[in-house]
């Protein structure tokens, strides 16, 4: 499975399916493998951040720079696991774990007000002022029972996001 010129075996497909908690069907995994091979231009079995940037939807994403640290050097199994958070079959827990990793920029297991503010800045650009961003974020935190000084852990994200989280992408199956 490391060499992209090889074909996936049934064992490989089942292993990847298990690794991503069955969020993709076997047919979807085969399609993802074909896409992975297209992205892996040098055929080394890993996708670099630069190769991932050739995907137009990713390149225009305002969070693409933040996602780089999660993407660089992914093998096929990791690539599928990364994408599994966007599957309609992914659990709320899987989606929250993914979002938490995006926000937790230093990887310490806690998200600060400033880390959240950085994400909000990336998402809003110049459309709202820094003062407006801080006010909105403070209000959201207060509504959930937190303050600017709170250090949020993953369980806090579940509380804040609730059941209204929708992150789904269709995987085209040939």
Image: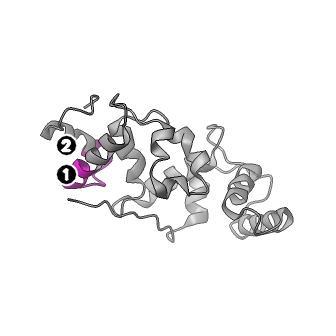
Along the line of sight, which residue is nearer the eye, 47 or 167? 47
Q: Nearer the viewer, residue 1 or 167?
A: 1
Residue at 19% from the left image edge and 54% from the top image edge: 27
Q: Position of residue 18 (x, y in %)?
A: 26, 44
On screen, residue 30 versus residue 100, left or right, reads: left
Classify residue 92 by image quadrant: bottom left
Colouring rule applied to residues = one colour
Rendered residue at 46%/35% (across/down): 48
| Residue 89 drawn in magenta | no
Q: x, y percentage for residue 125?
A: 73, 62
Q: Which residue is disc 2 drawn over?
A: 14
Q: Earlier in the sequence, mark 1 or mark 2?
A: 2
**Disc 2: CA contacts within 10 A as few (<14), some (14-19) or many (>=20):** some
Q: Quadrant of residue 87?
A: bottom left
Residue at point 17%, 36% (across, down): 7
In three-dimensional space, the C-alpha distance between marks 1 and 2, rounded to whole angstroms, equals 7 Å
47 to 61, vertically: above or below: above
The dominant secondary structure in magenta is helix
Q: Quadrant of the C terminus?
A: bottom left
Magenta stretch bounds: 17-31
Name the front one of labels 1 and 2.
Answer: 1
Residue 26 bears which disc, if any? 1
Q: SS class of the residue under badge 2?
A: helix
Nearer to the camera, 29 or 110? 29
Residue 11 position within the rendered picture, expressed as x and y whole percent measured from the top left = 15, 37
The N terminus: image quadrant: top left
């Amino acid at each position: 499975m490391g060499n992209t010129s090889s074909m996936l075996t049934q064992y490989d497909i089942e292993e990847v399916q298990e690794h991503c908690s069955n969020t993709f069907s076997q047919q979807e995994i085969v399609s993802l493998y074909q896409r992975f091979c297209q992205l892996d231009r040098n055929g080394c079995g890993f996708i670099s951040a630069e190769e991932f940037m050739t995907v137009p939807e990713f390149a225009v994403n305002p969070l693409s720079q933040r996602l780089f640290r999660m993407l660089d050097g992914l093998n096929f199994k990791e690539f599928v696991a990364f994408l599994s958070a966007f599957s309609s079959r992914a659990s709320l827990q899987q989606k929250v774990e993914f979002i938490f990793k995006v926000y937790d920029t230093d990887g310490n297991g806690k998200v600060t007000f400033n880390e959240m503010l950085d994400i909000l800045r990336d998402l809003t650009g110049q459309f709202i002022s820094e003062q407006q961003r801080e006010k909105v974020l403070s209000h959201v935190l207060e509504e959930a029972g937190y303050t600017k000084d709170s250090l949020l852990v993953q369980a806090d994200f579940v509380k804040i996001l609730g059941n209204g989280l929708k992150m789904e992408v269709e995987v085209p199956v040939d």
